[in-house]
Amino acid sequence: MGKEVERKFLVTSTAWRELAEANIRILQFYL
């Protein structure tokens, strides 16, 4: 049970990091 939650959290944090990096690239493109 704990590993399932841990994996879900890891996937979520990875997705957020990729999303943030994409947003940074977009911001740098417009600035």
Image (tube, rainbow, N blue to C red):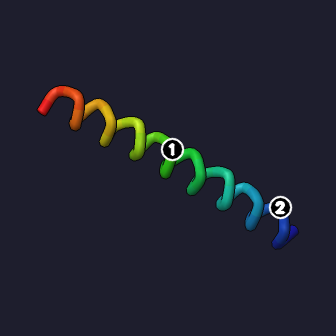
**Residue 10, picture quadrant:** bottom right
Q: Which mark is residue 18?
A: 1
**Residue 22, picture quadrant:** top left
Instruction: Give above or below for 6 relative to 27.
Output: below
Q: Nearer the viewer, residue 1 or 30?
A: 30
Q: Which residue lies furthest to the top in this view?
A: 30
Residue 18, x across and y down, in percent: 51, 44
Type of residue at label 2? Glu
Q: What element carries label 1?
A: helix
Type of residue at label 1? Glu
Instruction: Give above or below for 16 relative to 30.
Output: below
**Residue occupying image coordinates x 49% and y 51%:** 17
**Residue occupying image coordinates x 33% and y 36%:** 25
Task: Specify few, some or many for label 2: CA neighbours under 10 Å numbering under 14, 14-19, or 20 or more.
Answer: few
Q: Nearer the viewer, residue 8 or 19?
A: 19
**Residue occupying image coordinates x 31% and y 42%:** 24
**Residue 23, picture quadrant:** top left
Looking at the image, residue 12 sits to the left or right of residue 16; the answer is right
Q: Residue 29 carries which label?
A: none
Residue 19, x across and y down, in percent: 45, 40
The residue wearing badge 2 is: 4
Quadrant where the N terminus sits is bottom right
Quadrant where the C terminus sits is top left
Q: What element carries label 2?
A: helix
Looking at the image, residue 13 sits to the left or right of residue 30; the answer is right
Task: Specify few, some or many for label 1: CA neighbours under 10 Å numbering under 14, 14-19, or 20 or more.
Answer: few
Residue 2, x across and y down, in percent: 82, 72
**Alpha-carbon distance for marks 2 and 1?**
21 Å
Q: Residue furthest left?
A: 31
